[in-house]
Amino acid sequence: MAEPNSDARPPVSGMGGVGSGSTPSWETEDKPTTARLVLADGTVFEGYGVGATGAAAGEVCFNTAMTGYQEVLTDPSYAGQIITFTFPHIGNVGTNDEDIETSNLQAKAGVVGCILKADITDPSNYRSSQHLDAWLKTQGIIGISGLDTRALTNLIRENGMPNGVIAYAEDGVFDIEALTTQAKAFPGLEGMELARDVTTAEPYQWDETSWSWGDGYGRLAKAKYKVVALDFGAKRNILRLLADQGCAVTVMPSTSTAEDVLAQNPDGIFLANGPGDPAATGEYALPEIKKLVDSGKPIFGICLGHQLLGRALGATTKKMHQGHHGANHPVKDFTTSKVEITSMNHGFAVEAGSLPDGVTETHKSLFDSSNAGLEADGGRIFSVQHHPEASPGPQDSHYLFARFVERMAEAKG
């Protein structure tokens, strides 16, 4: 049955009194709502549609970052997810063509939708070239504003990341029963292989370096090392920081064989971030990663690359309750005895207790003690769960790219 729009805006259903999806007090009270977030358990949030119209299913998570919403929305690791921004003011600096993080522009935006507390305001930043609302439309991302993000975040923290459907209809008419059925039918990210959806189709070369004030992005002048990056959903700023270290990077599809990689005669191998369940991606990637481990080449992994490397070395991974998504996560580096504030985005984790002999835990989350890093073979092979490229986020972990170069220098003698 279609649900007619109502100025009365009934409270959220199925929440047990947790909160309501009514309009914030600063909004016009008689403004009709045009968007819904419908969870698989029947919970319904109301709000105002932004971005693209339509309906899409995904896993609902929350991100606590205060900056970098465009980088978050273009991170391929978010494929299949609906992002709830806990910071209320999203869109203030607009969007531009420089802050896109996906390295595969041919792939559709991995993010299913975004959830905002406040309405999007007009941008106020000299780098802005497009309003966030207009940009979301061009990316095909469905958004909803005016939603009680605190209530939704509390729900996720208590019950875990739910499956849901985000829907925007300009006439404000929704078939809630059909949307609930669609949410229930979404299989969830556990067991889902998504790297193939975001990886590059063909190998390509990368030489762009980091952005600097007044100059923008630069180009690598002289390469000292050759790196092959296996693209499970690589972010641009990771590739830039490799180039900053003098690395000429060849980006290759996630389905590349070890023979394809080693034919490039790289000094080192990088395993990129990406979306989905590492167990599912590992069905085709692990045999090749094990061969790369045996090749004697230095290997560095981030995010999904860390999880895949852990599994290739004999560890197991697990689905997390609420995941880690934000730019304020404290991590202890046991190799330096320092605590870093890091950027994280993952819903799966390597189980620290499953690390076999010869594989050492190097980093640990200080929020929940989950594994955040490992190394093997005297440090020739290492990886981290967090995002040291800091896009968005703090730059505490930039040293890891220099560490990778050190490993390559040692291997070259």
Image: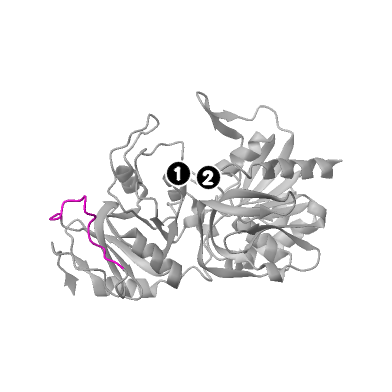
Q: Which residue in the structure is indicated by mark 2?
A: 393
Q: Is residue 388 above or below residue 5?
A: above
Crowding around mark 1 (Cα neighbors within 10 Å: few <14, some 14 to 19, many 20+) is some
Residue ID for mark 1: 68
Which element is circle 2 on? loop
Q: Is residue 255 visible?
A: no
Q: Horizontal and vertical percent for residue 281?
A: 59, 64
Counting from the top left corner in percent of width and height, residue 308 is at 65, 61
Which corner quadrant holds the C terminus? top right
Instruction: Find residue 49 and report its horizontal and vertical position in percent.
Output: 25, 54
- Residue 8, relative to residue 208: is it above or below? below
Q: Secondary structure at mark 1?
A: loop
Residue nearest the viewer, comparing 410 with 412: 410
> What residue sits 59% from the left and 38% below the top?
240
Percent from the top left, x then y, of residue 214?
Answer: 50, 23
At label 1, the amino acid type is Gly
Characterize the local packing of mark 2: few (<14), some (14-19) or many (20 or more) Cα atoms within 10 angstroms.
Answer: many
Q: How many marks?
A: 2
Q: Disc 1 vs disc 2: Cβ atoms closer than 8 Å?
A: yes
Residue at the right extreme, as displayed? 413
- Residue 214 left/right relative to 232: left
The stretch in magenta equals 19-31
**Closer to the camera in the image, 229 or 352:** 352
Query: In terms of image quadrants, where is residue 120?
Result: top left
| Image point (37%, 34%), residue name | 128
Residue drawn at (61%, 34%), measured in percent from left and top? 207
Query: Spatial distance from mark 1 to mark 2, Cα to Cα?
Result: 8 Å
Instruction: Say what amino acid the circle numbered 2 marks.
Output: Gly
As drawn, the label of residue 366 is: none
Q: Is residue 329 rendered to the left or right of residue 363?
A: left
Q: Is residue 323 magenta?
A: no
Q: Which circle's residue, 1 or 2, is located before the other in the chain?
A: 1
